[in-house]
């Protein structure tokens, strides 16, 4: 693939080298042909102002850089081991991936594939499958030998993976669920009618209990259009926030999620009654807030902010460092209902 690109698109490869390969160099800069090339190269200057790679990089570009890095690593490791294998017998590997007719027959018989077709009909598919398995095993051997070569100082690696793509999220009117003296923040975008959001809450509650004094937990709304009562529920949560009851309302909505859909025809009446059940003291103020849809603009702004940073579904989380001066979170996005351990692995990177 890379050879094809090199032959057919030489100019593209030169640009690719500047944009993608050079940022992998371990030092802050490298000297090539007496020119200093930085990891975050200047791509252009507009009236004297520089535009650098990080100024234009988005999640898609970052994902492509990581994909290319992975492909380069596979090729690099194999090339390094082949070179070592010419001198050291323990690094010698067989690069041939052959599949014999005997192996195909054995696979066919062992997996009882007669009901799916004859051996002749399935032999090519079986062959390709066995080849994939052998390539995976070979890559495992190469990875092991490569790490061994690094430990023995036979290989000095000059590349590094691209950093995780960090997005910038203004906190604006986000709800702070706790206020520890910390820079590490966990921001959640959720929808009160989203099943995956509800199922993730136990993990989030566990995280809050464990990291209450070291991680700032915040929340913004992302009611999805097909969850027709989610925006009204978000509105009620914000109205409860006026009376310091956001957290109680927040937890109650997820625990009683099914009720929101059942009360579709009388959602506002339901939310007013629901407010009493969670301990809203000034019911008149709360009801008026709902009737006036006082915080509709706040919820809409949450949605727009979420979409602007690439959130397309719920739940979505941004975990990273919070700048208290600019009130901006610089972090990486994870989506879906993760388990506590998966969240912890990311949190620990920023705590360390």
Image (spheres, helix red, strand yellow):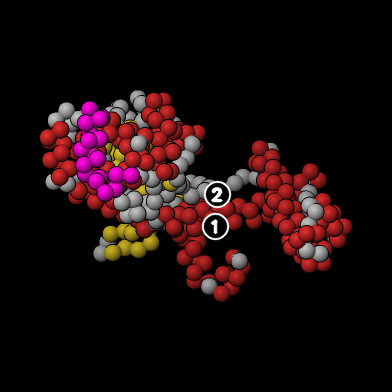
Q: Which residue is mark 2?
A: 159
| Quarter in which the N terminus is drawn | bottom right
Residue in front for this viewpoint, 56 or 276: 276
Q: Which residues are magenta?
A: 262-279
Residue 334: x and y in percent read: 43, 45
Pointer 1: residues within 10 angstroms few (<14), some, or many (20+)?
some
Residue 295: x and y in percent read: 18, 45
Residue 237: x and y in percent read: 25, 38
Badge 2 element = loop
User: In the visual, does 199 lie left or right of 161?
Assistant: left
Q: Which residue is mark 1?
A: 68
Is residue 294 visible from the viewing direction of this image?
Answer: no
Instruction: In the rendered view, tell whether residue 348 sits above or below residue 224.
Output: above
Q: Quadrant of residue 210?
A: top left
Q: Quadrant of residue 61?
A: bottom left
Count the marks. Answer: 2
| Quarter in which the C terminus is drawn | top left
Residue 165 part of the magenta segment: no
Residue in front for this viewpoint, 223 or 263: 263
Judged by its main secondary structure, the magenta piece is helix
* Mark number, residue 9: none
Q: Earlier in the sequence, mark 2 or mark 1?
A: 1
Badge 1 element = helix
């Amino acid at each position: 693939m890379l050879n094809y690109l090199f032959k057919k698109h030489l100019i593209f490869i030169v640009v690719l080298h500047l944009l993608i390969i050079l940022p992998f160099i371990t030092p802050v800069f490298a000297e090539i042909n007496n020119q200093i090339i930085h990891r975050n190269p200047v791509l252009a200057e507009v009236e004297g102002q520089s535009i650098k790679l990080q100024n234009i990089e988005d999640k898609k570009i970052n994902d492509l850089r990581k994909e290319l890095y992975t492909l380069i690593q596979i090729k690099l490791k194999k090339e390094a081991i082949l070179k070592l294998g010419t001198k050291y017998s323990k690094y010698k590997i067989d690069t041939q991936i052959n599949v014999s007719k005997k192996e195909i027959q054995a696979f066919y018989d062992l997996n009882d594939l007669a009901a799916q077709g004859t051996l002749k009909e399935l032999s090519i598919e079986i062959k390709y499958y066995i080849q994939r398995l052998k390539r995976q095993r070979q890559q495992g051997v190469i990875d092991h030998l490569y790490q061994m070569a690094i430990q023995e100082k036979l290989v000095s690696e000059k590349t590094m993976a691209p950093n995780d793509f960090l997005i910038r999220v203004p906190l604006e009117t986000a709800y702070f669920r706790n206020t520890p003296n910390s820079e590490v923040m966990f921001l959640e975008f959720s929808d009160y009618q989203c099943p995956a959001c509800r199922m993730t809450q136990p993990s989030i509650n566990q995280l809050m209990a464990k990291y209450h004094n070291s991680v700032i937990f915040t929340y913004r709304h992302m009611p999805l259009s097909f969850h027709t009562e989610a925006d009204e529920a978000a509105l009620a949560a914000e109205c409860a926030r006026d009376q310091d009851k956001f957290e109680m309302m927040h937890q109650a909505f997820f625990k009683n999620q099914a009720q929101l859909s059942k009360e579709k025809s009388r959602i506002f009446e339901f939310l007013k009654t629901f407010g009493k059940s969670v301990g809203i003291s000034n019911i008149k103020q709360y009801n008026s807030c709902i009737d006036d849809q006082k915080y509709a603009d706040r919820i809409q702004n949450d949605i727009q902010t979420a979409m602007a940073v690439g959130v397309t579904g719920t739940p979505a989380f941004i975990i990273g460092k919070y700048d208290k001066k600019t009130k901006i979170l610089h972090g990486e996005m994870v989506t879906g209902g993760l388990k506590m351990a998966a969240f912890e692995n990311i949190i620990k990177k920023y705590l360390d």
